[in-house]
Amino acid sequence: MKKGQISIKEIAKLSGVSVATVSRVINNNGRFSEETRKKVLDVIEKYQYNTNAVAKTLRMNKSQTIGIIVPDINNEFFSTIVHGVERYFFERGFSTFICHTDKSPEKERAYIKSLDAKMVDGLVCISGQEEIDDSLLSRNIPIICIDRRPKTRKNISIIESDHFDGGYKATKHLIEKGCRNIIVLTKQSNLSPVNDRIKGYIQALSEYSYTFDPSNIIRIPNHQQFNVDLTKEVIQKEINQGKKIDGIFATNDWLALNAVMALNELGFNVPGNVKVVGFDDDTIAKYFKPSLTTIRQDIKKIVEQASSLLYQMLTNKEFAADKKHIIVPVTLIERDTS
């Protein structure tokens, strides 16, 4: 165990006493023997824990810390959100534990347990999983889920982009640009944002009396989603099977950019032969050649909504936000690929 990282529960365990006894010793309040006091203080001294912080946490049941769970810190959308939330809370006297799960359910569960042991006051969760294992939490703390609607038993608040409208806008744009055979390029995922984007695609087809063909939803394995060769292989296979593709809606920008490069290698002109729309408006979308038409998520608004909502839940006992669901509008950014 590293120094400075011990929790209240661990102090109690190492001292052989209860958490309540540790609280009495730190606050010098209540009955305990000199032997017990020495055991507890020896553990605290050994691990160099800030006893003032411990005492304050126990007295107020607040640690002035929050946890952020993020599935992929290399993802520009996620990293920008994490940076914004961390800055918001730092300016208000909160420390932040940032936990990168690398989309691993095992790591996510381990981090939830770790954050609970550190007695964080609340969680911001951008989960890479379909379900948050809230049974790992020993306390009923507020949870804000960003851009995910996980299956969970606890009451949580959700902040997300209007993914359905994004998928609808992207597909409508392709249709209005003359596309008649539009495929969706996506990753293998059952997360709510991807599902909603596909539902928006289907809705746009329906409104324009296009027939929806489930085989037009092309899923690429997650670990290979940025692989241009694989994207080329997938598109080539569809063409070889007789599919006449003139429009591609990719559910993230990197898949869209892969598609553009793959199409170029296959001899197709973008946007002459095939038009492409992505999703997210990552920085590269603007500077890639040809620049990418995409759906922009309002990251600033997402950060503002999520941070202010969690802050109110932490600081205002009368504020009730259970099951609050905020949907942030998205915008179509038209560039050279359409």
Image: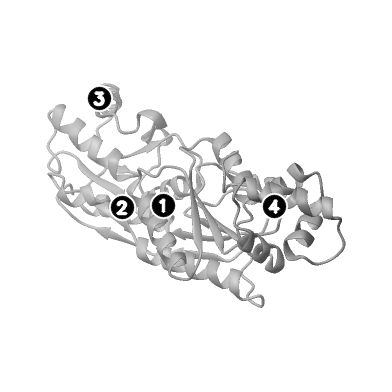
Residue 65, position as x, y percentages in the image: 55, 60
Which amino acid type is shown beneath numbered disc 4?
Ile
Side of 100 where 47 appears, left or right: right
Q: Label 1 near label 2: C-beta < 8 Å?
A: yes
> Which label lies toward us, 1 or 4?
4
Distance, label 1 to label 4, CA atoms, is 48 Å
Please give the label number shown on residue 8: 4
> Which label lies toward us, 2 or 4?
4
Secondary structure of the residue carrying numbered label 4: helix
- Tell me the residue at 82%/51% (across/down): 36
Side of 127 where 240 appears, left or right: left
Q: Label 4 near label 1: C-beta < 8 Å?
A: no
Residue 314, position as x, y percentages in the image: 60, 69
**Of the image marks 4 and 3, the number of the one nearer the N terminus:** 4
**Of the image marks 3 and 1, the number of the one nearer the N terminus:** 1
The quarter of the image holding the N terminus is: top right
Along the line of sight, which residue is nearer the eye, 22 or 280? 22
> Which label lies toward us, 4 or 3?
4
Which amino acid type is shown beneath numbered disc 1?
Gly
Residue 220: name its quadrant. Answer: top left
Which amino acid type is shown beneath numbered disc 2?
Ala
**Of the image marks 1 and 4, the number of the one nearer the N terminus:** 4
Along the line of sight, which residue is nearer the eye, 223 or 82? 82
How packed mark 1 is, by other alpha carbons closer than 10 Å (few <14, some 14-19, many 20 or more), is many
Residue that badge 1 annotates: 200
How packed mark 3 is, by other alpha carbons closer than 10 Å (few <14, some 14-19, many 20 or more), is some
In this figure, what is the number of numbered marks?
4
Distance, label 4 to label 3, CA atoms, is 52 Å
Q: Label 3 near label 4: C-beta < 8 Å?
A: no
Residue that badge 2 annotates: 170
How packed mark 2 is, by other alpha carbons closer than 10 Å (few <14, some 14-19, many 20 or more), is many
Secondary structure of the residue carrying numbered label 2: helix
